[in-house]
Image: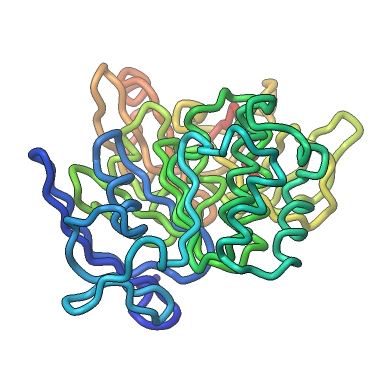
């Protein structure tokens, strides 16, 4: 799939910044809709890139155009307060002496946004029970929901989220992710989402920017880039693939039947109407291989596949890239198992999937 061309339907970002021995040098065209995730290790320049886009890095130079509007070029530099950007950081930054409602009204009144917008995001982010409370009495997840609403009620043209879940524990992250999905689906503006968590990218992103050392390693449709075996993501301990799925049914024990390009898969999950579209993630370490189908085991997820490629990994392991009905899979096994099964590219195998993680 081609990169988005620069224009009214894209965000054009060309930014350079040098500071304290670090250099950011980015040249991107991003879709002007959906969620673009900026992913990479700590210190790679993700947050610096968002600060450049927000106008918070005076030393940055280059070009920035958002949906046909020029925010920066050789002759123009729109100041930060006029860039119509909503931004949420790791910590909410709410005014502690104001109630939740007063925090929201503060951002809304400064922007001169319609009253309906304030009411809309209060409802969509389930904030009515919190409106009279002060930030100090809220949980971390509740504070981030309020911060998200405060950014949205200012009617931004672009929403920048800088690791908004990184300060939360797993339970609180699970609580706020559905609200982030609602924003991605309903806000009608592009979202740039900085994270170092693969699970967040897999669940939220439509487009992926992979960064390292201040530069872009790869960019493109999220599922395509997440599933590429030639990118650093495939070498992580939690390497895996993300597949699109549709719910076929749910049995009396809570087991969902999920139709994917790789075949029929089963996973426990909440009630979902038939036809519901979901994403699911299968980690390489949760896939074992056999030369024949085995129905005499507790494993339910058995997929016919073909070995496409084999790559050696440290610690006596190998990673196999598989093709299953046109869908990619990764399997991580020991070198001894590779030799015992005499696996080689082109061989037919059965992929035995031990765990399937539902993402959305």
How far across and how far down the image is residue 149, in percent?
Answer: 64, 50
Residue closest to the eye, 260 or 107: 107
Q: Is residue 132 left or right of residue 86?
A: right
Residue closest to the eye, 26 or 71: 71
Q: Residue at x 56, y 39 (%)?
A: 94
Q: Is residue 199 left or right of residue 128?
A: left
Residue closest to the eye, 82 or 271: 82
- Res 356 visible: no
* Quadrant housing residue 72: bottom left
99 is higher (above) or lower (below) than 85: above
Q: Residue at x 56, y 31 (%)?
A: 352
43 is higher (above) or lower (below) than 220: above
Q: Residue at x 65, y 38 (%)?
A: 98
How far across and how far down the image is residue 119, in percent?
Answer: 77, 59
Q: Residue furthest left?
A: 21
Q: Residue at x 20, y 51 (%)?
A: 215
How far across and how far down the image is residue 192, in percent?
Answer: 44, 56
How far across and how far down the image is residue 228, in percent?
Answer: 36, 50
Q: Residue furthest front?
A: 97
Q: Is residue 269 left or right of residue 310?
A: right
């Amino acid at each position: 799939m081609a990169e988005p061309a620069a224009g009214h339907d894209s965000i054009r970002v060309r930014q350079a910044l040098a500071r304290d021995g670090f250099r950011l040098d980015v040249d991107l065209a991003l879709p002007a809709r959906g969620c673009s995730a900026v992913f990479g290790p700590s210190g790679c320049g993700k947050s610096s890139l968002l600060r450049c886009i927000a106008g918070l890095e005076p030393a940055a130079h280059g070009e920035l155009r958002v949906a046909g509007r020029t925010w920066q070029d050789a002759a123009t530099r729109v100041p930060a307060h006029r860039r119509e950007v909503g931004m949420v950081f790791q910590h909410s930054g709410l005014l502690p002496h104001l109630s939740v409602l007063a925090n929201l009204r503060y951002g809304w009144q400064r922007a001169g946004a319609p009253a309906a917008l304030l009411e809309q995001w209060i409802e969509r982010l389930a904030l009515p029970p919190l409106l009279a409370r002060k930030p100090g009495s809220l949980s971390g997840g509740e504070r981030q929901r309020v911060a998200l609403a405060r950014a949205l009620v200012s009617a931004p043209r672009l929403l920048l989220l800088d690791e908004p879940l990184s300060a939360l524990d797993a339970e609180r992250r699970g609580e706020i992710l559905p609200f982030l999905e609602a924003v991605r689906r309903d806000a009608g503006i592009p979202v740039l989402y900085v994270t170092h968590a693969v699970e967040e990218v897999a669940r939220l992103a439509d487009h992926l920017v992979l960064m390292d050392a201040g530069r872009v390693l790869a960019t493109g449709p999220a599922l395509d880039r997440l599933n590429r075996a030639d990118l650093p993501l495939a070498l992580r301990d939690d390497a895996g693939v993300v597949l699109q799925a549709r719910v076929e049914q749910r049995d009396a024990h809570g087991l969902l039947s999920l139709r994917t390009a790789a075949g029929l898969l089963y996973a426990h999950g909440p009630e979902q109407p038939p036809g519901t579209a979901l994403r699911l993630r299968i980690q390489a370490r949760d896939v074992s291989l056999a030369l024949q189908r085995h129905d005499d085991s507790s494993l339910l997820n058995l997929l016919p596949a073909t070995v496409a490629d084999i790559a050696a990994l440290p610690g006596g392991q190998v990673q196999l890239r598989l093709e299953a009905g046109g869908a990619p899979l990764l399997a991580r096994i020991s070198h001894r198992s590779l030799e015992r099964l005499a696996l080689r590219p082109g061989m037919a195998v059965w992929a035995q999937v031990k765990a399937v993680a539902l993402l959305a």
